[in-house]
Amino acid sequence: MSSITITLPDGSQQQVPSGSKPIDIARSISPRLAEDAVVARVNGNLYDLTRPLEGDAGLQILTSKNPEALEVYRHSTAHLLAAAVLELYPDTKLGVGPPIETGFYYDFQRDTPFAPEELEKIEARMWEIQARDLPYERVMTKKSEGLPKYASEGAWMKCELIEEKAEEVFSEYTLGPHFIDFCRGPHVPSTKRIKAFKLLMVSGSYWKGNEKNARLQRIHGTAFFSKKDLEAYLTQVEEAKKRDHRKLGQELDLISIQELAGPGLIFWHPKGALIRKIMEDWMREQYLARGYSLVYTPHIGRKQLWQTSGHADFYADSMFTPMELDDAEYRLKPMNCPFHILIYKDRLRSYRELPVRLGELGTVYRYERSGTMHGLMRVRGFTQDDAHIFCRPDQIEDEIVSCLQFALDVLSAFGFTQYEAELSTWDGGASGKYDGSPEQWGMAETALHKAIERLSMNAKVMTDEAAFYGPKIDVKLVDAIGRKWQLSTVQFDFTLPRRFDLEYIAEDGKAHQPLMCHRALYGSVERFFGILIEHYAGAFPVWLAPVQAIVLPITDRHAEYAMKVKNQLAAAGLRVEVDATNEKVNAKIRTAQMQKVPFMLVVGDREAENGTVSLRNRRHGDQGAKPVDEVLAAILKLTTDRTPYE
């Protein structure tokens, strides 16, 4: 029998019979490894454990410790869901069922909507199928045979996918004798490997995400390697529901979305607008302190501008339709960068002026599809803390370090203590899909690597994940309940400087093209505000709270002293209100507590006589009688120090 050579991650090699399967090789190394194995990586590609090897190969066995393994596990659970749905509702048509960051989903076409109680029925059937220990088996099918087969079953979505994506011979995966699905795989060996999953909800979707296509039903679920991890996630989901910024935004009278105006457009109410002002003022002050120049740019621009920038071609689906004005077609801006470029290009620049750092809190407009919008997190009009840096090659490393330090300072200022960073690089030019020369990519990626090292940041390298126009660093914050949110981005751009013929006069007296860096730290004001609401569950730090203290007179005769206390605190710059309603003081305290006001200052006869207040803290309750000056000093210190929790 012929043999092949297997190279393991530690560099050691084994001779194994031709056609050996990764699961058998894992078993020969360690029975425990075979038991924990989820999927293999063969010559860099994910590979079924039960698929025979076709020749000499580098082999790595992936277990629950590998992130890629969880994606495969969840993809397999999505197939388990589809198999259960077809057993229960045979006339259902299958769409797609990918793994996602929080679990998986599968899209279905069915005349009758799935009711909430049907999810329990489907989940029970999934467990029945899981107990059958059915193998996920890979089948190779000719396109000429597969298309008629799916067409005869009325599986029109699968037919479209095969027409668009399949090679002349493509892979399908079976799950028992009655389920087969067009799929690239790979999958876990059998249903018995799936130990913990939960169906979560049903939502509407459209085929291929286009609202002009057929309406589908999307069943969402999640899966983990252990019941303990699943329970922890479900607990997090329940906590997230309590912190939902859409619910709290309404209860705290911060923001709204008005149906008459249209979806995805945010109305900032007085309290929300005040917090936004504080956020924006802080950012603008930081801009000026860090050497940025503030600019303001229009909301629309001629079509020719977007043609020059490339947005009219590459970003057209996300732009609003043109407006016919007197002299030309205009379009709402989806990005600020072309406008900042025009400011840079407005006059000749010397190398001595560089770096030029232009910053703006600029509102942009993007056409998000119906059904994709989500409160403050995904909207059609939003404000970016956008900045663009134009610099010389010898300046770029220092500029990246400054941007990353700025990003970390934003996290610290707003009370976030944990983050993760990712460095997205190109594929070395192998695919031809990236703009810029190898020299430019090498210089940019080296600068990013060095900046990360200088700041002692841990950054995961994401190979072949860069934008086509340059490498980038993304910073993801971790919120109070452990969720990760994409926040700051520092992005190189080789394309726009070339498209707009940007220049500076160098020391040699010749024109050179500057390097350009995009940089957004809030991401968008709207999304960052939504994250803040959920991180703090609406109980904003004192420095951000729209009402920092409320004075609660016990009876009407104490109203005069309440106003005196309010005026004293307000004169020092604090945001203070008086609850002069005809309610009992306990009811006033409950209202202030529900509105998450940091401090409640109860005043009655004794307080008026002694020049004190009876202080209550929203977190710690009654703090006893305190002199007004002492309370004022304490609140001012929390505000000045930007303390996250009082």
Image: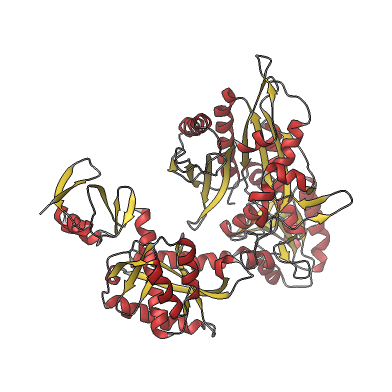
Of 320 and 574, the residue lying toward us: 320
Where is residue 553 shown, x and y percent of the image? Answer: 76, 64
The colour scheme used here is secondary structure
Question: Quadrant of residue 339 in the image?
Answer: top right
Where is residue 404 shown, x and y percent of the image? Answer: 55, 37
Q: Is residue 361 left or right of residue 457?
A: right
Residue drawn at (72%, 51%) of the image:
364
Where is residue 290 shown, x and y percent of the image? Answer: 66, 32
Q: Is residue 363 at least partly visible in the picture?
A: yes
Residue drawn at (58%, 59%) of the image:
534
Q: Is residue 294 above or below residue 104?
A: above
Where is residue 597 shown, x and y percent of the image? Answer: 67, 59
Kindly give the residue lying farthest to the front in the view shown.
144
Of 641 and 561, the residue lying toward us: 641
Q: Is residue 435 above or below residue 513?
A: below
Of 249 and 4, the residue lying toward us: 4
Of 87 and 149, the residue lying toward us: 149
Q: Is residue 627 left or right of residue 239?
A: right
Which of the image's four quarters has the N terminus?
A: bottom left
Q: Is residue 630 at least partly visible in the picture?
A: no
Q: Is residue 567 left or right of residue 434?
A: right
Question: Quadrant of residue 624 in the image?
Answer: bottom right
Kindly give the residue lying farthest to the right in the view shown.
326
Q: Is residue 305 above or below residue 529?
A: above
Question: Quadrant of residue 357 in the image?
Answer: top right
